[in-house]
Image (cartoon, coloured by chain):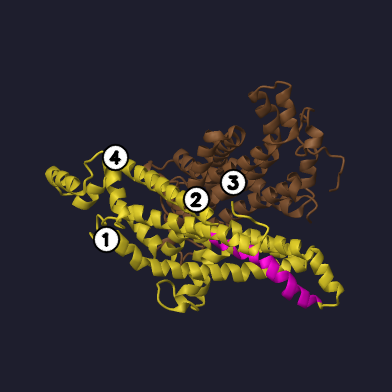
Amino acid sequence: MTNPTVPDLASPALSAGSQPPAKPRPGVLRRLVKRRLAVLGLVIIAITVLGAIFAPWLTAFGPDEQLFDGLTLSGEPLPPNVTYWLGSDLLGRDLLTRILYGARTSLFIGVVANGTALVIGTLIGVTAGYLRGWIGGALMRFTDLMMAFPALLLAICLAAVFEPSLWIVALVIALVNWVQTARVMFTQTSSLVEREFIAAERTIGASGARILFKHILPHLVPTIIVWGTLGISTTVLLEATLSYLGIGVQPPTPSWGNIIFENQTYFQAAPWLVFFPGIAILALALAFNLVGDALRDILDPTQRGRE
Amino acid sequence: MIAYLGRRIVQSVLILLGISIITFALLYLLPADPVRQIAGRSATPATVESIRRQLGLDQPFLVQYGRYLANLLHGDLGRSYIQRSEVSQLIISRLPATLLLMVGAIVCELLIGLTMGLVAAVRRGSRTDNSLMVASFVGVSAPQFVVGLLLLYVFAVRLSWFPIGGYGTFRHLVLPSLTVGIMGAGWYARMMRSSMVDVLHQDYIRTARAKGLGRLKVLLGHALPNAILPIVAMVGIDIGILMGGIVVVESVFGWPGIGQLVWQAIQRVDIPIIMGVTLVSALAIVLGNLLADLIAPFIDPRIKLR
């Protein structure tokens, strides 16, 4: 768009035969920061990451610390005030502290669950698209089957089967979320396999592994980046929902979803206990959606020139 | 067409079969013991064993599944462990509420989403367009339980425009439908915008303008119907997403649908109900997808069913 000389990884004409450039697309980040919405997304993500890392230094309280003056004399949570910026929760803990520590949970689940889902989805999609035949067919039928599964119900059943811990919740979400990625990877791979440059590689005797890793996977990198980013948003929302239902991350480990779960009986009197963690979930999911969408515009050749 | 339909129906049945196996296996592996739940804490080991035998839960997995499947073919989803009533009866009694909620949600998401997309496409590149697209992103990124709780707080607790929860009148329906609909509205706004932008670039739109038709007439008479049809066909696919939301939204609003039914069943390890509701939701999703595919060639004659 702005820089027409940037080599296009996804177009076959440029990368056919030649090695893909070692540094992927030098222009992507520069083009990303030219979009105001993407910048907003990046800023929100940066704030969340910094808040999660530096939580112990950013707040004077511990996440599980029930503060002596954290409740009113009649035992009610405190509204936002000078000492407790976002108020205190039902047990007299500082809400800001719990939200900061909760960011760790959300980011952990976002990265681990989505990373796992991405690996599973890419493996299944690429295998099915490359091999085809009965193995590919079987894999894609299985993917179709998972598509028809009511996702939240599946997650609830899985969460009920395993004892919920941080890793298990991440695994459950990964097991539900790989399906979309697999579909996209399958479509892309099966159209790539048809291209001339793959046939040319075959005729000069390249091995299957070489074709897969040197030629097919590099072409899938843009798609993986886009889906990896958008997927974190879905993951964050699913974790929050499971934790809200009480079958995700278990208290006292703070998670934005379980903060709302713990306090919702009181939300008519103390709406900030739902409002602030809710905003946090929304902002993080929104941020990854904004960045992912901008990345898709930049990286996906089929979307180019549409606007 | 008939061959295609036949193949798709066979496929759908196989998918449902697969889902029933996976769900049954998951519930079989459940660490919580349903018999303990039924018998209560004070039951003697002998009572527990006799209940287990009565329910056939002492049998191996394949025997249990085979028995379930055989009953399913007769339309029998079994009996609830706790309430002792037939699962099919329970689901049928709860289904109207859920269907009503879904209709409400679809109306909300189409009304909000299509309007947003239409305005954004017409005012492409403007500030209105940008803010509408940001709004659509917010809609897509908003967790449903937070939207539901916030709507409840503002419109039911504070303003008392709508009841806080429950079921029965039109006023009960508004907030839950809006809660489910807001996420979908975000998707529809984006799809509608890109569909409308595509249509507005077509030659026949230029022709219509060239022959002297007014801007509004071209927009509403020529562009809108063509842009809207492929979107409406998406409603079939949407059913899966709506189904995902009902557990949460029904529990926030105390809506007596199958979402609440299954949520209570999950907490009490009432396996027949969990199985039944999962199968009914999967059936709805499969039918929705089938419907969307069958409508497609009527909307766009270039699509051939193969």
Q: Which residue is mark 2?
A: B7
Same subunit: marks 3 and 4:
no
Label 3: how many Cα within 10 Å (few below 14, some 14–19, many 20+): many
| A179 with respect to B208 (left or right) | left
Q: Please provide the residue range marked out in magenta.
A: B215-236
Q: Earlier in the sequence, mark 4 or mark 1?
A: 4
Same subunit: marks 4 and 1:
yes
Disc 4 residue type (three-letter): Phe
Membership of B222 in magenta stretch: yes
Numbered label attached to residue B61: 4
Label 2 lies in what chain?
B
Membership of A261 in magenta stretch: no
Disc 3 residue type (three-letter): Ile
Chain A shade in the render:
brown
Residue A269 vs residue A79, the one in the foreground: A269
Alpha carbon separation for disc pair 3 and 2: 36 Å
Label 4 lies in what chain?
B
For label 4, the SS is: helix
Which residue does the image show at 19% across and 45% down from the upper left?
B52
Q: What is the x, y in percent for residue B157?
A: 47, 73
Choose mark 1 or mark 2, whichever is in front: 2
Residue A230, above or below B298? above
Label 1 lies in what chain?
B
Disc 2 residue type (three-letter): Arg
Disc 1 residue type (three-letter): Glu
Same subunit: marks 1 and 2:
yes
Q: Which residue is mark 1?
A: B86
Q: Earlier in the sequence, mark 4 or mark 2?
A: 2
Q: Which chain is yellow?
A: B
Q: Which residue is mark 3?
A: A232
